[in-house]
């Protein structure tokens, strides 16, 4: 790509941070200025082509940059607008899309993007889907080997198959009988996994009982993309890493009623050799201590009677699914028409939508509040407030 100035892109008038226009390639583009860089987002109107692209014009060097784009890309739409939110992300409003698909964020300077940029030694941007209101947090379930995490998660997935989605981890351990690659784990070679960790493909990874285990960013995003609440079954080291990542989750630690009962369960499973059982039991002592660490877990459940523990887990999840948050937007779902405009002031975005009803042109005003955003890539950006202000016939 040449180094020429991108024509009218550089003419973003003072005070206006974003412009949108139709592109030559029968798509729609926006150019958004953030910290001396112009982020050009281009989408195709042609559903068959299915693309949405990001390129960057660096005003300070006069050069184009093609960034490494992380996260699940939004599907193309008939149009879009872009509004910069602080210095770290751009809100993308997609027109003519289903209600749960119209708000997206392109992270350009978030902590995650900075970290990945350092790791990869490249210019990085990352997509994350916007969620109106609090939305349910992913759930991290941790606890010593044999305590019953997998059993509890299986019950949950069976009872609520459309609500919860399992984050399928990678591991270098050998598959057990009945374990299916891609369902229980992605079974992988150590060298392959080590390379993928270096390439920044993992949200967290840890050496657990002598094998590598890790949660790939793709695994978490696949669940979010399916519109489900993500469940992660990971060890305490993993829980600690996720705690310090941008994935805002609910952390639950499962304890056994006693160490003797844990040993009994681990042995009764008959999946480990005696040596492996001994190793897992040694690690369990440390994990049970770590589980008490202040601020690491939000809830501790004792898995004594399975049914009682399962009922308690369900209560926790239903109470904490985001629907009881104080922060409630007035609008939870709508469609943005192609004919819309946006302006921003003090982190409040005003969106004017034009529609037509019974031959009359109707203008509706919405306020988008981005002052309480949470989470972000990898995963979703929650906490977007959408408030209907007025609607009038012109
Ligand atoms: N409350 C319970 N009472 C008795 N047995 C249980 C209970 N919960 C789970 N089990 C049994 O204990 C064994 C270990 O459970 P499970 O495999 O779910 O543990 P886990 O925490 O997922 O282990 P790992 O971390 O190694 O994957 C299984 O045989 C399971 O059927
Ligand atoms: N840090 C991570 N720990 C993980 C992950 N996936 C599973 N685990 C934990 O490993 C142990 C052993 O599991 P097993 O299937 O071999 O019995 C268990 O405590 C899991 O919670 C992961 O992605 N990251």
Image (cartoon, rainbow, N blue to C red):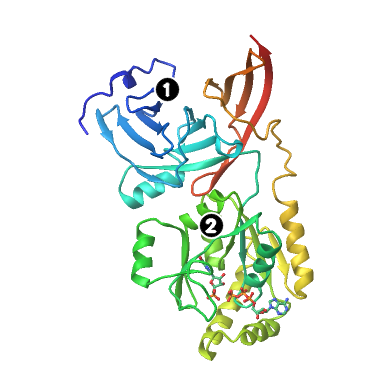
Res 65 → quadrant: top left
User: Going 72% across and 80% down the picture, which residue do you hit?
Assistant: 258
Contact? badges 1 and 2 (CB < 8 Å): no
Q: Is residue 138 left or right of residue 257?
A: left
- Where residue 103 appears, as percent x and y from the top left, is 55, 35
Above or below: residue 42 compared with residue 173: above
Using the image, tell me which numbered label, if any, was put on residue 20: 1
Sort mark 2 into few (<14), some (14-19) or many (20+) by Cα contacts within 10 Å: many
Above or below: residue 280 compared with residue 5: below
- Where residue 314 appears, as percent x and y from the top left, is 74, 60
- Where residue 212 appears, as percent x and y from the top left, is 44, 71
Q: How many marks?
A: 2
In this figure, which residue is indicated by the disc labeled 2?
242
User: Going 63% across and 59% down the picture, which residue do you hit?
Assistant: 251
User: Going 55% across and 81% down the picture, which residue do you hit?
Assistant: 280
Q: Is residue 146 left or right of residue 121?
A: right
Residue mark closest to the camera, 1 vs 2: 1
First in residue order: circle 1 vs circle 2: 1
Q: Is residue 75 left or right of residue 25?
A: right
Res 391 → quadrant: top right
Which quadrant, please, contains the C terminus?
top right
Q: Nearer the viewer, residue 117 or 48?
A: 48
Which quadrant, please, contains the N terminus?
top left
Q: Secondary structure at mark 1?
A: strand
**CA distance for labels 1 and 2:** 37 Å
Sort mark 1 into few (<14), some (14-19) or many (20+) by Cα contacts within 10 Å: some
Looking at this rendering, what residue extends furthest in the left direction?
2
Res 382 → quadrant: top right
């Amino acid at each position: 790509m040449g180094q020429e100035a991108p024509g009218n892109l550089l003419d973003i008038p003072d005070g206006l941070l974003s412009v949108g226009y139709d592109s030559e390639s029968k798509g729609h583009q926006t150019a958004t200025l953030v910290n001396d860089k112009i982020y050009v987002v281009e989408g195709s109107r042609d559903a068959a082509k299915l693309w949405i692209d990001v390129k960057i014009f660096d005003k300070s060097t006069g050069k184009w940059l093609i960034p490494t784009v992380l996260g699940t890309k939004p599907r193309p739409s008939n149009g879009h607008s872009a509004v910069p939110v602080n210095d770290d992300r751009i809100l993308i409003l997609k027109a003519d899309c289903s209600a749960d698909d119209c708000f997206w964020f392109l992270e350009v300077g978030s902590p995650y993007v900075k970290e990945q940029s350092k790791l990869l030694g490249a210019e990085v941007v990352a997509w994350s889907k916007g969620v109106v209101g609090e939305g349910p947090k992913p759930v991290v379930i941790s606890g010593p080997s044999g305590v019953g995490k997998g059993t509890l998660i299986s019950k949950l997935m069976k009872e609520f198959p459309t609500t919860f989605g399992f984050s399928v981890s990678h591991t270098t351990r050998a598959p057990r009988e009945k374990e299916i690659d891609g369902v229980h784990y992605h079974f992988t070679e150590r060298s392959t996994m080590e390379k993928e960790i270096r390439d920044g493909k993992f949200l967290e990874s840890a050496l657990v009982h002598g094998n590598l285990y890790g949660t790939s960013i793709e695994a978490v995003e696949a669940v979010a993309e399916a519109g489900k609440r993500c469940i992660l079954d990971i060890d305490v080291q993993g829980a600690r890493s996720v705690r310090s990542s941008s994935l805002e989750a609910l952390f639950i630690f499962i304890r056994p009623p006693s160490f003797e009962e844990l040993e009994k369960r681990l042995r009764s499973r008959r999946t480990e050799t005696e040596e492996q059982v001994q190793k897992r039991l040694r690690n369990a002592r440390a994990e049970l201590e770590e589980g008490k660490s202040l601020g690491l877990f939000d809830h501790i459940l004792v898995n004594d009677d399975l049914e009682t523990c399962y009922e308690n887990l369900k209560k926790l999840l239903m109470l904490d699914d985001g629907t009881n948050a104080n922060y409630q937007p007035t609008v939870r779902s709508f469609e943005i028409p192609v004919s819309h405009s946006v302006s921003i002031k003090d982190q409040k975005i005003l969106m004017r939508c034009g529609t037509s009803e019974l031959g009359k042109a109707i203008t509706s005003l919405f306020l988008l509040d981005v002052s309480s955003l949470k989470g972000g890539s990898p995963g979703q950006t929650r906490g977007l407030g959408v408030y209907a202000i007025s609607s009038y016939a012109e």
